[in-house]
Image (cartoon, rainbow, N blue to C red):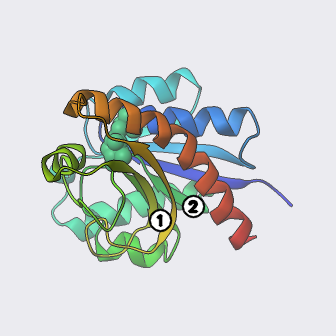
Amino acid sequence: MSKKGLGILISGRGSNMEAIIQAALSKQIDATVNVVISNKKNALGIDSAKSYGIKTFILEKKDYSSKKDYEEEISRILKDHSVDLVCLAGYMTLVGETLLASFNNKIINIHPSLLPAFKGLNAQKQALDYGVSYAGCSVHYVDQSMDGGALIMQDIVEVLDTDTEESLSKKILKKEHLLYPKAINLVLKKKS
Ligand code: GRF
């Protein structure tokens, strides 16, 4: 059977994207990264994806007359590149019904908290402000809610009294890079 194709959607740095690309290259996941799409033209991750020879696209919502048109274009590109599973990796916008419908149950996301706690922006700061002893990251299916779809995998980190938003974010990010490829493998196995 041919390898599954991944499409990655980003908005910025792309360190999770890179972790997925490396996991695919080292055969830790049985899939290829076929395309990377950014919704921000200056996303650092685009250069990084290009350096691996991966096809990249920049599509900004403002250039489309509606979210539907915008997501139809994303969907067309993903399908043209034989994408079976869409991985959001720091894609900083809510996925709309058009994209959800064309990749039904085939879109996943990583979030830097132990969901369902601390959804949305600045999850690490929310966790610190709340005073938790453990924080972490979650990979989940994407639905129409923000960070609300069914959980796939989670991992935890201990929060120390000395932790700052920066140090906690760093610790969680390290775990994210390990967790995301594992979760992708799990999803692909279920789907094959
Ligand atoms: C990560 O913390 C991810 O969990 C969140 O956005 C951040 C993206 O970082 N959704 P990067 O672009 O993958 O480096």
Left or right side of 143 for 67: left
Q: Position of residue 55 (x, y in %)?
A: 53, 36
Identify which residue is drawn at 31% across, 77% down.
Answer: 97
Identify which residue is drawn at 39% across, 57% down.
Answer: 74
Left or right side of 5 for 150: left
Question: Separation of disc 1 and disc 2 at Cα?
Answer: 6 Å
Q: If the picture is divided into quarters, which one holds ligand 1?
A: top left
**Circle 1 sits on which residue?**
107
Q: Is mark 2 within 8 Å of ligand 1?
A: no
Which disc, if any, is residue 35?
A: none
Q: In terms of image quadrants, where is residue 20? A: top right
User: Which one is in front, 156 or 66?
Assistant: 156
User: Which one is in front, 13 or 66?
Assistant: 13
Do the residues under discs 1 and 2 have CB atoms within 8 angstroms?
A: yes
Determine the secondary structure under disc 1: strand
Determine the secondary structure under disc 2: strand
Q: Position of residue 26 (x, y in %)?
A: 74, 32
Label 1 Cα neighbours within 10 Å, binned few <14 / some 14-19 / many ≥20: many
User: Which one is in front, 108 or 61?
Assistant: 108
Q: Position of residue 38 (x, y in %)?
A: 34, 42
Quadrant placement of the N terminus: bottom right
Residue 74 vs 103, above or below: the answer is above
Q: Amino acid at mark 2?
A: Leu
Which disc, if any, is residue 85?
A: 2
Identify which residue is drawn at 61% across, 43% down.
Answer: 33
